[in-house]
Amino acid sequence: MLWYSRKIFAGTSFIKSTAKGIEAIVMEILISLSAALIGGLLMSRLAKRLHLPAVTAYLVAGLLLGPFFIGLLGIPGLGFSSMESVERLNILSQVALGFIAFTIGNEFRVSQLKTMGRQAIIVGILQAVCATLMVDAALILLHFIRPEAISVSSAITLGAIAAATAPAATLMVVRQYKADGPMTRLLLMVVAIDDAVGLVLFSASFGVAMALESGTISVVSVLVEPVVEIVLSLLLGSVAGLALYWVERFFHSRSKRLSISIGFVFLTAGLSMGEFELGGVHCGFSLLLVCMMTGTLFCNICDFSEELMARVDGWTAPLFVLFFVLSGAELDLSVLRNPSVLLIGVIYILIRSLGKYLGSYGSCALTGCSENIRNHLGMTLLPQAGVALGMAITAQSLADGAMVRSVVLFSVLVYELVGPALTKRSLLAAGEIMPEGKTSARKKNPQKTKRHSVT
């Protein structure tokens, strides 16, 4: 009996110690999140003085709170001491991406598609293909000059990753400065289409790269699986959009409708993480495509969607701040130690940027876009983040996959810090955001409105 009592006491002590350990972890996470949110917002005040977008400030704040700066101190809750501590908050990043895609879906209204749907599709495809081909050519040439630096399979894979454009930073700049106009509307549609195009290009290129290394090629993985993923994502998003509209009709309170919308974004983000096999074909979903299609369908069939989307935008503001601070904390500075990675990374960044610019310029000219859009759209398509990193993780199965991931990490570091400022500058040059000065950039520019009405 005494032995049994001791066992119970020992078990109770273990449960209590485990509970205390969990409480300590939760406390550390909550303090880290508060430091990330407050630190990012404080950094944005400095960025405002330097006329930089707030998203750049959030990324820098994350970099400073990350494991290469403040995180090195090892003070619990003050920054992130390791990449693992950042990665365990990945669910916040996934939810934020879901809301970003849901918001972008608002741009695919039938009225917009009638006026520039054809342009968006052509520009979205051609600028991605152009970037891929140019990076392929440059890195394959580097292989023949220095075979030890990069293999042909890695060059092809990096070329495909070059097609991906991150919509998050672009959307944040547009929202911060209330950008509006034909280029802004085309830009948001292009970055959404870019996700599907990048997925197809990467699947095909990565399949060829694996074939070069193994000597066999899988038609299923190269051609079938990317198409299946896109189709399944659009179908799931369509069903979710219809279901959201059906549920929203039972409520009339603004707060309850907002809650339902938030719940559905959580639902679609969760469902999009599912994977299964059907007849030997690996089936999965694209988070961005699913949530984008949900927003697109809902906004086209719901007569009160405009007001509701505006309320969703207001609710997600702190979530987006956390998303970019965490993205900054994930930037790995250790890649700067490898000279080969720096060489390939510089070539990748320069050629990809040129490919995006030339591809968008040529496709805009082909579709009859104005000179203003032709000159400035390309610089807004440079940011890279989550999608490219996801592709890089997949590419680690290559013989020198670690090098591919390091190059992508280096490019993300550069693009995420520089891209938002270039996006702001391009939108400003295009006349679709007002210059910062005496009048708040958050208000519509009456002079711009008048100018557009005259032209």
Image: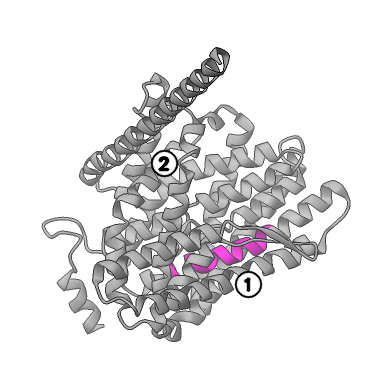
Q: Main secondary structure of the magenta part?
A: helix
Say which residue appears at 34% left-offset and 38% top-offset.
33
Instruction: Say what amino acid the circle numbered 1 marks.
Output: Val
Q: Measured from the top left, where is residue 249 in percent x and y? A: 35, 80
Task: Please indicate whether residue 262 sits to the left or right of residue 254 in the image.
Answer: right
Instruction: Say what amino acid the circle numbered 2 marks.
Output: Leu
Q: Which residue is mark 2?
A: 326
Which quadrant is home to the C terminus? bottom left
Q: Earlier in the sequence, mark 2 or mark 1?
A: 1
Q: Measured along the vertical axis of the image, is residue 122 above or below residue 419?
A: below
Q: Measured along the vertical axis of the image, is residue 178 above or below residue 151?
A: below
- Residue 56 seen in render: yes
Which quadrant is home to the N terminus? top right
Front-most of residues 354 and 181: 181
| Display coloring | one colour
Q: Which residues are magenta?
A: 187-202
- Residue 432 seen in render: no
Q: Is residue 191 magenta?
A: yes
Say which residue appears at 88% left-offset and 54% top-offset.
216
Q: Measured from the top left, where is residue 195 in percent x and y? A: 55, 63
Q: Measured from the top left, where is residue 422 in percent x and y? A: 38, 53
Q: Which residue is mark 1?
A: 231
